[in-house]
Amino acid sequence: MLIVKMLLGLAFLGSFAWFISAPSFESAVATVSSLGAFIGAWIGDKRLKQKGRQNQVVENGSVGIQAGGNVNVGKIENQGSSKDVKQKSEPKRW
């Protein structure tokens, strides 16, 4: 991600220098676009780092389910003190 940020920074500096040397609509659009991409890379990187900070503590005899979005959990069966969890299968309906 660092290389992408560096390239976007160079693109912004280049487009800004182009805008200063030859002000026109094209150079202004390039400058604004490259600045938006540069800022977006920093914001997106912060969100990715925050997403990876999930932490969970589960006591004995319980089941912990952790996800970054919607979770659909069927019937769960815990096998005693084992930390392995199996999903109960439902009978097939014909």
Image (spheres, rainbow, N blue to C red):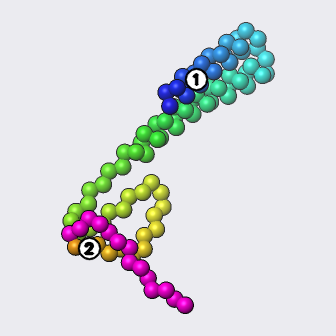
Going from N to C along the chain, the mark reached first, 1 or 2, is 1
Depth order, front residue of 35/5: 5
Q: Quadrant of residue 82?
A: bottom left
Q: In terms of secondary structure, where does tag 2 sit?
A: loop
Residue 77: x %, y % from top left: 32, 75
Indicate whether 6 appears above or below 60.
Answer: above
Residue 63: x %, y % from top left: 30, 66
Magenta-colored segment: predominant secondary structure: loop
Q: Nearer the viewer, mark 1 or mark 2?
A: 2
Depth order, front residue of 87/59: 87
**Residue at position x 76%, y 11% in the image:** 22
Along the horizontal axis of the image, is 33 left or right of 82?
right
Disc 2 designates what residue? Answer: 79
Tag 1: amino acid? Leu
Disc 1 designates what residue? Answer: 7
Depth order, front residue of 87/35: 87
**Residue at position x 26%, y 60% in the image:** 58
Residues in magenta? Answer: 81-94
Residue 7: x %, y % from top left: 58, 23
Q: In terms of secondary structure, where does tag 1 sit?
A: helix
Quote the CA–CA distance across marks 1 and 2: 53 Å
Tag 2: amino acid? Gln
Q: Quadrant of residue 38?
A: top right
**Residue at position x 73%, y 21% in the image:** 28
